[in-house]
Amino acid sequence: MECTIIIATYNEEKFIEECIRSLENQTYSKDKYQIYIIDGESKDNTTGVVEKLMTEYINIKLFNNPKKIQAVAFNIGLNNAETDYCFVVGAHATFDKEFIENSVISIKENDVECVGGKVKFDAKTKVGQYFALARGTLFGGGTASYRYSDKKQYVDTASFGCYKTESMKKVGGYNEELVKNQDNDINKRIRAQGGKMLFDPSIKFTYFTRDNYKDIKKQMFNYGYWESKVIKQDPKQFSIITMVPVAFVIYNIIAILLAVKTIVPLLLCYVPYLLVYSMFYFKHAAGKNPIKLLWIYLTIHTSIGVGLIKGWLTK
């Protein structure tokens, strides 16, 4: 056995079967990897779906995670893994047939602590499809290479990465105090010990985004909130890009308050914003509903900004 694939689940009955079947339909030999499902006591039929699949595939193991925290789930998987490599992936995804094979080849050939691949965003609803479209662009997804690059390169973090198990255990595994953004935190600690991470576009998977405005706002808010906690723990993680959504939210509040006297501040904010948006719209989404996509971008930026602000203002 060479690889362990760790998946944390909670109420994932709509996605988990397709996810697992894609991992079972790999070019990599089944006797070389195992799949660990760590479930946070789901209230739906997630465990029932997994147990049914366990009768078909002998390389699946199911664990319980009563604390319901992702970082705890990842550590349960990591602590039970006795393989050379560990993948940490999500249930909202399906994986290309060469996903495992290309990951293992890449991490061996490049002698790095982690390799990650390129994500294609998809969704099962119209709202989700617009969100997926936005997240796949620089304007809606930050600077992470795995969102849009086709160039192999060293990176600070990797999505759904393949890690050297020894490297993860050496830094103490995941920080269980972080409800979100625990991947950025462990990647930071691995890099601090001289470890390297590689983005390899030959490693491919599809991620199914949130598919309604409520879940999108919640996800983006949590991203910002817990990103601020990571920065509080390690100020070196701060970047100017982090401040962009914060500045956007604060400036908007000020501009709206001043709008009773003059709309100039609002124009100074939204004219440049709309110009940048137009560039990405015509490059990536020509023919789509421009108002719906604009609303998605505004939701992303304001939700992340509000989350960052609240995270910094609370202990």
Image (cartoon, rainbow, N blue to C red):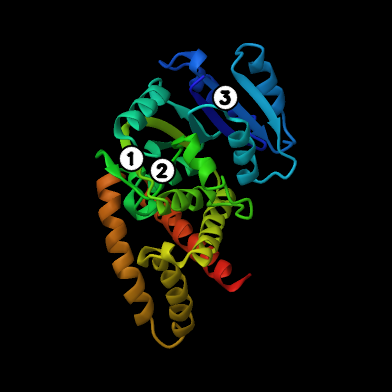
Question: How far apart in space, not on screen, are marks 3 and 2 (Cα)?
Answer: 20 Å
Query: Residue reaching furthest bottom?
Result: 261
Q: Using the rendered view, name the quadrant where residue 109 is placed.
A: top left
Q: Amino acid at mark 2?
A: Ala
Q: Amino acid at mark 1?
A: Phe
> Which sits in the foreground, 309 or 218?
309
Placement of the C terminus among the 4 image quadrants = bottom right
Label 2 vs 1, first from the N-terminus: 2
Question: How far apart in space, not on screen, are marks 3 and 1 (Cα)?
Answer: 23 Å
Residue 10 drawn at (x, y percent)? 66, 38
Q: Using the rendered view, name the quadrant where residue 205 is placed.
A: top left
Residue 191 drawn at (x, y percent)? 40, 50
Q: Secondary structure at mark 3?
A: strand
Q: Which residue does the numbered mark 2 point to in the structure image?
A: 158
Question: How far apart in space, not on screen, are marks 2 and 1 (Cα)?
Answer: 7 Å
* Rendered residue at 61%/13% (across/down): 58
Q: Which residue does the numbered mark 3 point to in the structure image?
A: 35
Tell me the tag on residue 14: none
> Which sits in the foreground, 67 or 120?
67
* Rendered residue at 25%/55% (across/down): 279
* Rendered residue at 61%/34% (across/down): 77
Q: Amino acid at mark 3?
A: Ile
Contact between labelled residues 1 and 2, with CB atoms less than 8 Å apart = yes
Tell me the tag on residue 199: 1
- Label 1 environment density (alpha carbons within 10 Å; few <14, some 14–19, many ≥20): many
Q: Is residue 149 above or below residue 280?
A: above
Q: Is residue 30 above or below residue 291?
A: above
Q: Secondary structure at mark 2?
A: loop
Q: Secondary structure at mark 1?
A: strand
